[in-house]
Every structure is written in structure tokens, then in C-alpha cells.
């Protein structure tokens, strides 16, 4: 591989994860057979737990196109793509001088948050939580607390057979 232009710009977490996957970081369960450094495996493991693992180039391109209307800086778009904020509090920490740039117009900020949540996929932990909540809502299965309470009662109950 030949480097054409060193330090051409910042990379999104998705681009880093995509690069590590192309080097085989996710293919070797033993982590011995691929030419990936241990530090790269640590980065790979971290990124697999972030929103980057569910992103694609098409999603990133769609998000960039929709963000043009908000006049955000490149660094702000990069941070939004990497962090995937879903609330006003999270956005306020990413966008510099958010109050003065968007004024008191919360509709614009809410529209940005809506764009983020619609286009960028959530991290795997949020996806699992949403899936589990949907399962629990449709079934009468006991909650973890009920299961734990039942186990404690069974241990405390005296054996009637001895």
C-alpha cells in the first residue's frame, strides 16, 4: 500500500472499523493468524461496541447530505457521526456555541436530532435494549427481578420430604 497523501483528514469510527475489518481483524477468533497488532484488536473490539459497527458508507453519505442544511463544521459532523447523540444535551456539547448559532429556535436543533436518530443506526446496546423491550412487552414472561425473587424463596423454603 502506498500513501498518496499523509494526514489528509480525520476519519470516522466507521472508516477505522472498516479498515481494521479489511485487514482481517474480525475474521480470526484466535487473533494469531492475521497481520493485526494487539493494539488494533483493542481498537476493533471497542469500535464493535459503538454505533460504527452498524453504519455503512451509504448511511454516512446520506447523513452528510442531510446535514448540509444545518451549516455544521466538519469536526462537528465527524463527532456527531462517531458519537450519535440523541438528545439536546448531547448535541449542545458537540456543536460549538449552539445557543448563538441556532438561537432560541429549538425546532432546528430538534430537526437535527431527528435526522440523526432516523439516519444513523444506534449502537448495539441500544438496539438490544429496544429488541428486549419489544419482546417483554408482547409476552408474559417473568422479569429478572421476579425470577431472582422466586429463586430466593425456593432456597429459603424448608424441604418437606426429609
Image: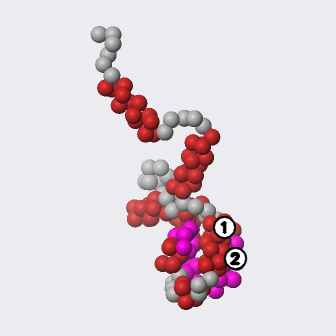
As drawn, 149 above or below 161: below
Which residue is at a point 62% across and 74% down the rendered structure image? 110
Structural crowding at the residue carrying mark 1, measured as other residues with C-alpha within 10 Å and reported as few (<14), some (14–19) or many (≥20): some
Say how the picture is coloured: secondary structure
80 part of magenta stretch: yes
* Secondary structure state at the residue bearing disc 1: helix
Residue 9 location (% of width, % of height): 54, 83
Which residue is at a point 56% across and 46% down the rendered structure image? 132
* Residue assigned mark 1: 119
Q: What stretch is highlighted in magenta?
A: 62-88
As drawn, 114 above or below 48: below
Structural crowding at the residue carrying mark 2, measured as other residues with C-alpha within 10 Å and reported as few (<14), some (14–19) or many (≥20): some
Question: Which quadrant is home to the C terminus?
Answer: top left
Whether the residues at callouts 1 and 2 have beta carbons within 8 Å, the answer is yes
Residue 129 location (% of width, % of height): 54, 51
* Secondary structure state at the residue bearing disc 2: helix
Which residue is at a point 39% across and 34% down the rendered structure image? 149
Q: Tell which of 35 and 57 is nearer to you.
A: 57
As drawn, 112 above or below 32: below
Q: Please, which residue is most extreme toward the top here? A: 162
141 part of magenta stretch: no
Residue 51 location (% of width, % of height): 55, 63
Dot 1 or dot 2, earlier in sequence: 2
Amino acid at each position: 500500500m502506498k500513501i498518496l497523501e499523509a494526514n489528509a483528514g480525520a476519519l470516522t469510527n466507521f472508516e477505522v472499523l472498516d479498515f481494521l475489518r479489511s485487514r482481517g481483524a474480525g475474521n480470526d477468533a484466535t487473533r494469531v493468524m492475521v497481520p493485526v497488532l494487539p493494539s488494533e484488536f483493542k481498537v476493533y473490539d471497542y469500535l464493535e461496541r459503538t454505533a460504527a459497527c452498524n453504519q455503512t458508507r451509504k448511511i454516512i453519505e446520506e447523513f452528510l447530505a442531510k446535514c448540509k442544511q444545518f451549516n455544521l463544521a466538519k469536526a462537528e459532523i465527524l463527532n456527531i457521526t462517531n458519537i450519535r447523540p440523541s438528545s439536546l444535551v448531547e448535541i449542545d456539547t458537540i456543536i460549538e456555541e449552539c445557543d448563538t448559532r441556532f438561537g432560541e429556535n429549538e425546532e432546528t436543533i430538534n430537526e437535527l436530532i431527528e435526522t440523526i436518530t432516523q439516519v444513523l443506526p444506534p449502537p448495539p446496546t441500544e438496539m438490544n435494549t429496544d429488541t428486549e423491550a419489544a419482546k417483554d412487552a408482547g409476552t408474559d414472561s417473568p422479569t429478572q427481578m421476579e425470577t431472582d425473587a422466586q429463586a430466593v424463596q425456593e432456597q429459603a423454603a424448608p424441604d418437606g420430604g426429609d
